[in-house]
Image: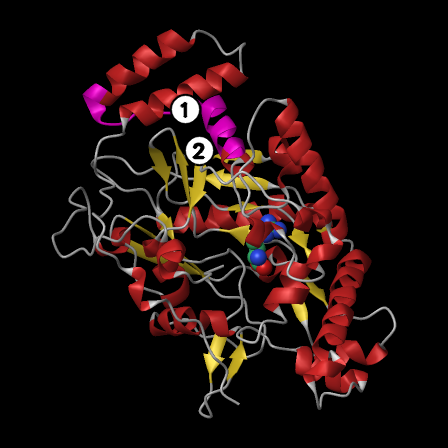
């Protein structure tokens, strides 16, 4: 069987004017953020003084520095504004690790490993973000190529099928070309790749920093023999954090898993691990017709297995019923605070049993709020295709060679109409 792997839409590189990360910070965006910060933190001192200071700083240097408090607030509010995230009830609890002084690729990847340990916390997963050096007018910050700090390699075999995660076949090829060798199993953890100032560093994640859960089923003992597993911490590293006009291109963050992300997408999608036919066969289901709903039955059993296994392993995980109820609680809280809460129905509604969850039965505000986490084309290309980001191609203090392809910042999905999650 030929497994379809991940392909970026051909429309990805558009005609819009490209972003210039070397451009000075947009003063209006900075001021808007500082006003928000002072409105929500009335004890933080005089807003007018801070704004005047920042205006001066931008005029002199083209950029400005957030205080640690502004950074923490910005990172938390960016989570609060993430329209695709159902888990936002706990946005205020985000741990913010301020590592803005770190930009060297080897140091960045070492701190990413440390992030995984802090986040895993022995199984009681804590939402956390580590913020590395920002982009500045004369120097771009570091960039992590990986889409997440822990992801599995995908190897194309001679018959066209894939061993591992088909989403990362091209990324696996790219790191292999840089000398990395995977063991060739279904679940080889990819190395972390970081670039800054023309230098690229490839680091294997130490085994003891990768918490994984073997998938077993509460009723079916044969399930364990499928050899399925998943990593416990989803740590997104391919998105930029944008606060008050400043971009932090390397700012990996994590929450904990919602079971369906693993059981109804990563292991189930036909272009990912595609295990439903195998599960159905073991369950002895009649797969001769779609109308037996064998896929749906297998999906439920796979998702029971995921939740059961994480719980048995003592790793935090949520189910879609609980998390949907929490999200509505979050909406109500936001409304009481006098804020709108942007939400994207097509991402909030779980990928199974949609109408069984209360989030299905309503619409949401869709306005776009800042600060925010942004996926840009450059990040997607690095994460899915292993295309070096600009910082990997440049050296020293001349990071803007005319050879660069400037890529659009956002909206690849919107323009192509394809979902690129
Ligand atoms: N859906 C992604 C995955 O399966 C993770 C996205 C973030 N999820 C989260 N629960 N914080 O790996």
> 45 above or below 74?
above
Q: Is residue 326 left or right of residue 97?
A: right
Q: Where 118 falls versus 169 (above or below)?
A: above
Residue 371's label in the rendered image is: 2
Q: Specify the segment rendered in magenta.
A: 59-77
Q: Is residue 133 in view from this perspective?
A: yes
* Secondary structure mostly taken by the magenta-highlighted segment of the chain: helix
Residue 302 image position (x, y, % from top left):
74, 70
> Quarter containing ligand 1?
bottom right
* Helix, strand or loop status at disc 2: loop
User: Residue shown at 22%/31% (left/top)?
Assistant: 24
Image coordinates of residue 329 in percent, x first then y, are: 71, 35
Indicate the position of residue 323 as horizontal and vertical percent values: 71, 47
Q: Are marks 1 and 2 in contact (CB under 8 Å)?
A: yes
Q: Is residue 63 above or below residue 45?
A: below
> Could you tell me if residue 124 is visible in this image?
no
- Identify which residue is drawn at 35% across, 65% down: 386
Q: Position of residue 117 (x, y in %)?
A: 61, 48
Residue found 69% across the figure and 39% down from its top = 328
Of the pair 400 and 298, the residue shown nearer to us: 298
Q: Left of 327 or right of it: where is 237? A: left
Neighbours of disc 1 within 10 Å: few (<14), some (14-19), many (20+): many
Residue at the image point whose x is 46% and y is 70% from the top:
168
Query: Eyeballing the image, is 353 above or below 141?
Result: below
- Find residue 374 and report its image quarter: top left
Which element carries disc 1, helix, strand or loop?
helix
Q: Is residue 145 left or right of residue 346?
A: left
Residues under labels 1 and 2: Cα distance? 7 Å
Quadrant of the image occupied by residue 379: bottom left
Distance from mark 1 CB to nearest ligand 1 atom below 8 Å: no
Q: How many numbered dots are placed on residues in this image?
A: 2
Residue under label 1: 33
């Amino acid at each position: 069987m030929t497994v379809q792997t991940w392909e970026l839409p051909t429309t990805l590189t558009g005609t819009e004017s490209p972003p210039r990360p070397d451009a000075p910070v947009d003063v209006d965006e900075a001021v808007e953020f500082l006003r928000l910060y002072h409105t929500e933190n009335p004890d933080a001192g005089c807003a007018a003084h801070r704004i005047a200071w920042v205006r001066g700083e931008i005029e002199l240097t083209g950029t400005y520095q957030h205080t640690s408090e502004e950074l923490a607030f910005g990172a938390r509010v960016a989570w609060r504004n993430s329209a695709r995230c159902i888990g936002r009830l706990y946005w205020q609890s985000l741990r913010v690790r301020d590592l803005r002084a770190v930009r060297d690729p080897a140091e960045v990847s070492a701190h990413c490993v440390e992030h995984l340990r802090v986040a895993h916390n022995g199984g009681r997963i804590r939402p956390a973000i580590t913020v590395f050096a920002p982009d500045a007018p004369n120097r771009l910050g570091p960039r992590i190529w990986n889409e997440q700090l822990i992801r599995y390699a995908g190897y194309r075999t001679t018959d066209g099928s894939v061993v591992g995660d088909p989403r990362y076949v091209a990324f696996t090829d790219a790191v292999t070309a840089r000398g990395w060798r995977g063991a060739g199993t279904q679940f080889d953890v990819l190395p972390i790749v970081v670039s800054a100032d023309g230098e690229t560093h490839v680091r294997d994640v130490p085994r003891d920093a990768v918490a994984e859960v073997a998938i077993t089923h509460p009723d079916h003992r044969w399930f364990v023999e499928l050899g399925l597993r998943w990593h416990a911490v989803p740590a997104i590293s391919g998105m930029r954090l944008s606060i008050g006009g400043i971009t932090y291109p390397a700012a990996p963050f994590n929450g904990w898993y919602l079971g369906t992300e693993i059981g109804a997408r990563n292991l189930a999608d036909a272009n990912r691990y595609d295990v439903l036919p195998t599960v159905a066969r073991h369950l002895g289901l009649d797969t001769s017709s779609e109308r037996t709903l064998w896929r749906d039955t297998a999906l439920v059993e796979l998702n029971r297995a995921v939740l059961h296994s994480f719980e048995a392993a003592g790793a935090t995980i949520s189910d879609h019923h609980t998390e949907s109820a929490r999200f509505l609680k979050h909406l109500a809280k936001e409304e009481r605070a006098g804020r709108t809460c942007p939400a994207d129905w097509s991402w909030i509604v779980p990928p199974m049993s949609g109408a069984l969850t209360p989030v299905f039965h309503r619409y949401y505000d869709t306005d776009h709020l800042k600060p925010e986490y942004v996926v840009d084309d450059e990040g997607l290309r690095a994460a899915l295709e292993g295309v070096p980001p600009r910082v990997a191609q440049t050296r020293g203090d001349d990071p803007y060679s005319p050879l660069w392809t400037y890529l659009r910042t956002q909206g690849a999905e919107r323009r192509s109409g394809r979902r690129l999650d």
